Image (cartoon, helix red, strand yellow):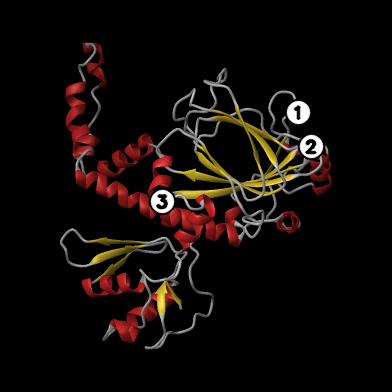
Amino acid sequence: MSGSTTLAEEAWRLAFGSLPMEDGLALRESPDWRHFPGNDPARYRHLVSIADIDAFLATDAAARPRISMADGNRKGSAAVPEEAYAFEDGGLDLPGLFATFDAGATLVISQFNQMHAPLARFCRGLEQVYLHAVQANIYLTPPGAQGFRRHYDTHDVLVLQVEGEKAWRIWPGQPFPNPTRRTPWPGGIEPLAEAVNITLRPGDALYVPRGVLHDAATQDGEPSLHVTIGFMEPSFAEVLRLAVDLLEESEPALRAAFPTWRLAEGPGALAALAQPLAAKLAEAAALDRTALALLDRLAADQPALLARGLFPKVPQADTRLRLAPGVLHALVPEPSGEGASLRWAGAPLALTNQEAAWVERLADGATPAELGEDSLDFCRKLRRLGLLAEG
């Protein structure tokens, strides 16, 4: 490894401080929440500010459904009706939005990482660690107000307190285990334990796993701005559905007619038919294919963050180059052992063993001259694609 800090390392330290990565990964596999007190009130201010939000609201990009509002003092749902702050075409009614905000509603901007470069880089660094999509939602709450009442999320979240303070209540445990987007709020959920009270101050972070009940409110006197980082990992069910879809292309037994006429034979009649197919799903080839599809989907669905503009500088033999830090990519060896496939946001690149070795060296930085003969044209190709940055 080179002495420079990678984008993933930079994002990890910003998110979790000095927590070792292995401990952070273990945290994601447990139902436990965790508070990370900060020691720098300005820790997250470079990610987003109230001034950034004011500037965004003045653009046409600020519209429904990216913009929404919530007020815990409303009867029924806390979600503020769209007509209070937006027109029928989705554009913002700014006078209405400001009046609704002044009356105590929280302003929510979903997936602001797709619009704001500092958040895009931060989320990309975490995506490189977890290999799944990461999103950043903005919550700006006026003084003495509450956006959402007690609820749980259907994905893990990391709350970054940017400005002001917010009082949180967390009820440990998962009364409805491992909820996903396909298992919406069933109602009547009661906590498993007494609430724990925490006040988040600027620079603090709070990790809350999905299914853990919580709510938050500001105090009188000052607003609160926080970023909720959403970890959008797939569930086992989602991965298995993808595996079935991919296996269907090559497995005739999955395309065979399901014998519904045998349903009347009683319990267990169809189990013998399903067991061989279940075994095929567990084979290494099927799971490897699914893993590759997940990597491709991550690279294709997220902003590319390529290391080039409209007029990229052509590298020379002595130009120091490195793989673009913001590009999601995977170097996948071919099963035959001959060559590899470079998976990224564009079409997969078929590489020779020599080219794959160059890519591995470029992860730490190298010049074409250091890579050796015939590497300059290859580096220029990757530079045009936005896969290489100078430095």
Q: Name the quadrant containing residue 236.
A: top left
Query: SS of the residue at dot 1?
Result: loop
Say which label, 3 or 1, has the lower sequence index: 3
Three-letter code, disc 1 = Asn
Name which residue lies at 70% across and 56% down: 49
Q: Name the quadrant containing residue 108.
A: top right
Horizontal side, residue 174 vs residue 329: left or right: right
The answer to whether mark 1 and mark 2 are in CB contact below 8 A is yes
Q: CA distance from mark 1 to mark 2?
A: 8 Å
Q: Name the quadrant containing residue 364.
A: bottom left
Name which residue lies at 16% across and 63% down: 337
Query: SS of the residue at dot 2?
Result: loop
Q: Is residue 302 visible?
A: no
Horizontal side, residue 293 vs residue 217: left or right: left
Three-letter code, disc 2 = Gly
Query: Mark 1 Cα within 10 Å, few/some/many (few <14, many 20+)?
Result: some
Read off the residue under disc 3: 21
In the image, residue 225 lies at what x, y percent?
A: 69, 47
- What's the mark number on residue 73? 1
- What's the mark number on residue 104? 2
* Camera-nearest label, 3 or 2: 3
Query: Mark 2 Cα within 10 Å, few/some/many (few <14, many 20+)?
Result: many
Query: SS of the residue at dot 3?
Result: helix
